Image (cartoon, coloured by chain):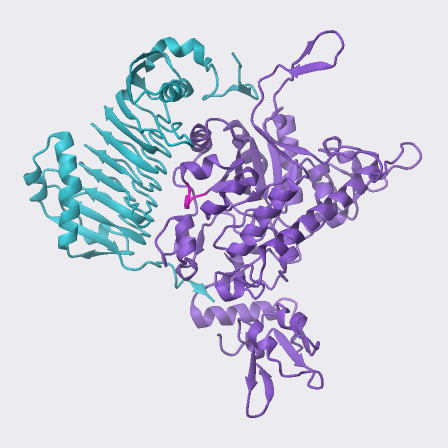
Chain colours: A cyan, B purple
Amino acid sequence: MVEYSIGGLRDMFLGNVRRLKEILKYAKISSDVAEIDASNLVHKEVNDLMRYCALQGVRRIVLKGVRGQRYIGTRLYFPDPRPKLEIEIHGFPGNDLGAFLDGHRIVVYGNAQDGVGNTMDSGEIVIYGQAGDVVAMSMRGGRIFIRDDVGYRTAIHMKEYRDKVPVLVVGGTAQDFFGEYMAGGRVVLLGLNLDDKPHRARYIDTGMHGGIMYIRGRVEPWQLGKEVGIVDMEAEDWKFIEKHVGDFCEIFGIKEDEVLGGSFLKLKPVTKRPYGKVYAY
Amino acid sequence: MFSHLLPEFIVERRDDRCIRCRACERQCSFEVHRYDEELDRMFSDEKRCVGCQRCAVLCPTGALIVRPHPGEYRRNANWTGERIQDLKKQAETGGVVLTGSGNDKPYRIYWDHIVLNASQVTNPSIDPLREPMELRTFLGRKPDVLELRFNGGDYEDVEIATELHPNVMIETPIVFSAMSYGALSYQAFKALAMAASEYGTLFNTGEGGLPRELRKYGKNAIVQCASGRFGVDPEYLNCAAVIEIKIGQGAKPGIGGHLPGEKVTLPISVTRMIPEGTDALSPAPQHDIYSIEDLSMLIYALKEATNYEKPVSVKIAAVHNVAAIASGMVRAGADIIAIDGLRGGTGAAPKIIRDNVGIPIELALAAVDRRLREEGIRNKCSILVAGGFRCSADVVKAIALGADAVYIGTPALVAMGCTLCQKCYTGKCNWGICTQDPYLSRRLNPEIGAKRLVNLLRAWSLEIKEMLGGMGINAIESLRGNRDHLRGVGLEDWELEVLGIKGAGE
């Protein structure tokens, strides 16, 4: 075992990491399903085992006893084309769940922490619970469904390109700076747990210059950044909402009619160039 | 165009030489030159001239002279012409004055106050033309202890028993600075990639992504993950040699970047993965990094995303507490720390920021190297420095002050044609370097550009070998942090102390 220490401090990621052969006992592989007991594993060990399982041809990984381990699903990029994995997490994954995710599907039975889907490329993350701050930051593709609330700075600088349009659906409400700097993608905030109370996030979509946000429930104009405007819902928007919110309701067992019956607000940037006029050329 | 401004340049056309070929008119994207058919005469609108000298050097008869305009305001040490003109621009637009390239103000350039040593009598100098001279450099974290295993008793069969961290080998301690495709034309960007690959060093993609067809140059690429996260996909990260988290830039510490929508053409939008015509906004902070702990989180996220196979660099601008920040970065897990000084270049930055924020790289480097050595963690990272390196002597001095390698941006652009007119932000670069206009960018041939860049690297490397040989050193490794080979001239005590060098004669 290599002991990593920096200037007397233990490296919180690499310290006490055991070699793969020492932790193989925590993974049980039967045909194409692997079950990993994560309760005694540190961050890197969980991902070491997951990568090992993926290389063994496993298609589905069930993680039990997850207690705050970070980057789950991040180290599953392989240059050669391989089938994508189905990852089931029981417990509480740590920060940066599914960061840079490459097409896999992650389902969390519990709450997630900060940085869910950070710079995620493709795939799907479903969370049966709530998530922390900076969810879907710079997300580039795929879908994230969060049943309950999200924290501050959600969907910052989300992007899109041609047919690669990321989608985030949040069942509860969000905190300040929701959708700040958004450059693309679709964000839906449903406010299902608000009981008709207004959303409380401020600075929504400040600096937004691309993408679309849909908010169900009450939001006052002062809560919005000055770079966005409220526009009318069109047929295409309803089609989008029906598809993705429909999927959301189906996954979480929520009555779709009640959700779609609410009032939706569509927010769009007023310009693709919010700061074009601040310079003297 | 602004009204009531004095022209900055005067265009003198020697009529006896002018053959009305109109080459100047075709070459100038700023539309200075104009031909009047009726009068059979060339006219010039000097107000538009930026002094890039493209017309002067391409005029087949040498009929053009472009030089600073002799017209000036009343001389005033406080209210220089530049200050007056900037005020007028602001009064007219209400906007922030933009500029390009590095800080041009007369801050002390410490390189010019540091001299190198050479061997005389007591220690022989080495002739690099006939004796081996090692410039090869490894970037990345080094182990605390190196354990060797000798197989058999003859000391021939040796292997390293210590588990090593990923390191990247470069043939010369010179690396091309971060300049994105978007700021640079495709041709200029490709020339840097080709040259790095040919010479065995690295180029840096900046934060504009790496076009797919150029990913074959990934082995020589430092790919950036910056606040805008443009073009960052798993393949982009995994094809690279080094991944760099960009926190700041010497020309504009603390602020983000705006690539204006008109520069986001189709190919740029493909590479950055944003819709065409949208402003590419890089926020000032990385919104997932508000502390050293957060930085650590992103460093390890990137290591996870690349299976711990690549060194991760963190680039910051040189600012007041740079040494403490650097220490935190190393503790956060950075394998390379890149520091960009006060004179670092840019494609576009507010002039007020470029000219006033940050500290000189010489002082920052010396402070960081000393701090990391005092804390016993200098081996945990490589130090890459950037910001105003003009020649090979600056590189040698930086290495003696503790750098592992040096980033060069402006010298590379000059090698490709740049004349430092500082108009990069207009997107009208007549040299085809800093533009997305196909008519202009075609002027730069990537093969020729790459050749010139390789020549530059070769010339500097030869000069470095000469200087090393003169000092009696045959490997760049022996010069690293070797301040005994430096002496200060015309520096004050506090400056010598920060630099950690003696005054000349001592």
Residue B251 in sight: no
Name the side, left or right, on which B39 lies relative to A280: right
Residue B27 in the image: state x and y as whole percent.
57, 72
Residue A143 in the image: state x and y as whole percent.
26, 38
Total count of labels: 0
| Farthest residue, direction bottom | B38
Residue B422 in the image: state x and y as whole percent.
58, 62
Name the side, left or right, on which B428 lies relative to B268: right
Name the side, left or right, on which B343 lies relative to A175: right
Q: Residue at x 49, y 75 (%)?
A: B2
In the image, B490 versus B483, the foreground residue is B483
Determine the main secondary structure of the stretch shown in magenta.
loop
| Magenta stretch contains residue B95 | no
Name the side, left or right, on which A212 lies relative to B269: left
Q: Which residues are magenta?
A: B226-232
Indicate whether A31 appears above or below B178.
above
Q: Residue at x 60, y 84 (%)?
A: B42
| Farthest residue, direction right | B121
Indicate whether B143 appears above or below A172.
above
Quadrant containing the C terminus of chain B is top right
Q: Residue at x 19, y 42 (%)?
A: A189
Indicate whether B493 appears above or below A7.
below
Residue B191 in the image: state x and y as whole percent.
58, 51
Place residue B28 in its image quadrant.
Answer: bottom right
In the image, A239 versus A82, the foreground residue is A82
In the image, A103 versus B7, the foreground residue is A103
Residue A58 in sight: yes
Place residue B5 in its image quadrant.
Answer: bottom right
